[in-house]
Amino acid sequence: MNLQTAIETPHPAALWAQTAPLDPLQVDCVTAVMLRILDNKCELAPEEQMALMAVYSVVRERKGLFFDTSIHREIDEALHAAGTVSVDRIHELRLFTEEAIPKPVLKHFKRYLHDSLYGV
């Protein structure tokens, strides 16, 4: 596979996310884990982080239960605008999402995501 093909080929997790029946709370869980990645607090392996980022790129447009579109704008800025959103702001957003989503719910979601993506 050449580099151009690799760039144009969607990550398998993104393909999964296109048809996954994620409810609004699960969409918020994806957002929360994305913020954990950006805040360097995520315990997922690097390949799992890449998979989550691919899922996020697909589901970020879906309606969540707790979070509105402003959180996605700040995540986009942190990913693409080289420092427009501060590290402190990402940290604040991560704490906000972790307060909104109970820890057992997020833990269950991460297990569901892992099982769905890796067929375990």
Image (cartoon, helix red, strand yellow):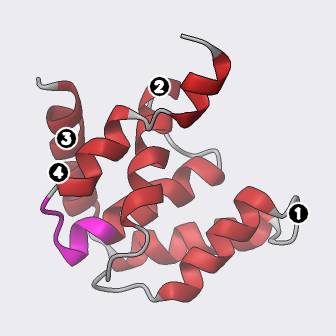
Q: Where, by quadrant of the figure, is residue 78 drawn?
A: bottom right
Q: Nearer the viewer, residue 76 or 65?
A: 76
Amino acid type, label 4: His
What residue appears at the point 18 percent right and 55 percent down from the top-left corner?
Answer: 19
Residue 60, numbered circle: none
Total number of numbered labels?
Answer: 4
Q: Secondary structure at mark 4?
A: helix
Find out whether residue 74 is within the magenta segment: no
At label 4, counting other C-alpha atoms closer than 10 Å, the crowd grade (few under 14, some 14-19, many 20 or more) is few
Q: Which residues are magenta?
A: 21-27
Residue to which mark 4 is pinned = 108
Question: In the rendered structure, which disc, 1 or 3, sits on the residue that comes first in sequence?
Answer: 1
Amino acid type, label 1: Gly
Question: In the rendered structure, which disc, 1 or 2, sits on the residue that comes first in sequence?
Answer: 2
Q: Position of residue 60 (x, y in %)?
A: 43, 69
Relative to 118, say whether 76 is above or below.
below
Q: Position of residue 31 (x, y in %)?
A: 44, 65
Residue to which mark 3 is pinned = 111
Residue to which mark 2 is pinned = 47
> Is residue 43 in sight in this rendering?
no
The residues tagged by marks 4 and 2 sit, at their Cα atoms, a distance apart of 19 Å
The residues tagged by marks 3 and 2 sit, at their Cα atoms, a distance apart of 15 Å
